[in-house]
Amino acid sequence: MTKYSREKIYTCPMHPEIRLEKPGNCPKCGMALEPMAPMESKAPEIHTEYVCPMHPEIIRSEPGSCPKCGMALEARDVSVEEEENQVHP
Ligand SMILES: [Zn+2]
Ligand SMILES: [Zn+2]
């Protein structure tokens, strides 16, 4: 007796609480639902942080300008898996 419960679930990228068993549109925002893999995929999480090229100690989670020199902060992608205490040469 084999039982497979690998039905695809469709979810809205904007509303993860929306889960339907067939493709369609999100009832909240109307976006096309995307199939969600039943297994947890190990996609590396990458977030973007913003740093001043002149002042590496200035790190913000959103774009802006450096409070010290007023330069526009530059975006850089950071993998969450990386240690935060990485030493830059
Ligand atoms: Zn939605
Ligand atoms: Zn600066």
Image (tube, rainbow, N blue to C red):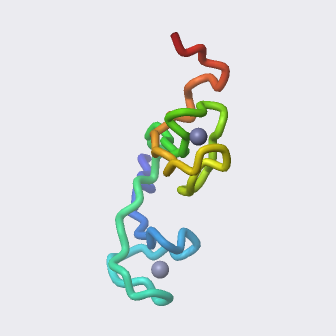
Task: Decide if residue 57 is on the left or right side of residue 18.
Answer: right
Q: Nearer the viewer, residue 85 or 63?
A: 63
Residue 80 position by quadrant: top right
The extreme top residue here reads: 89
* Residue 7: percent from left, percent from top: 39, 61
Q: Nearer the viewer, residue 74 or 1?
A: 74
* Residue 32: percent from left, percent from top: 33, 78
**7 is higher (above) or lower (below) than 59:** below
The extreme front residue here reads: 69
Q: Nearer the viewer, residue 53 or 4?
A: 53
Q: Residue at x 39, y 88 (%)?
A: 30
Residue 42: tell me if it is visible.
no
Residue 56 position by quadrant: top right
Task: Decide if residue 34 is on the left or right side of residue 66.
Answer: left
Q: Residue at x 49, y 51 (%)?
A: 72
* Residue 70: percent from left, percent from top: 57, 51
Q: Residue at x 57, y 53 (%)?
A: 65
* Residue 43: percent from left, percent from top: 44, 40
Q: Residue at x 66, y 32 (%)?
A: 57
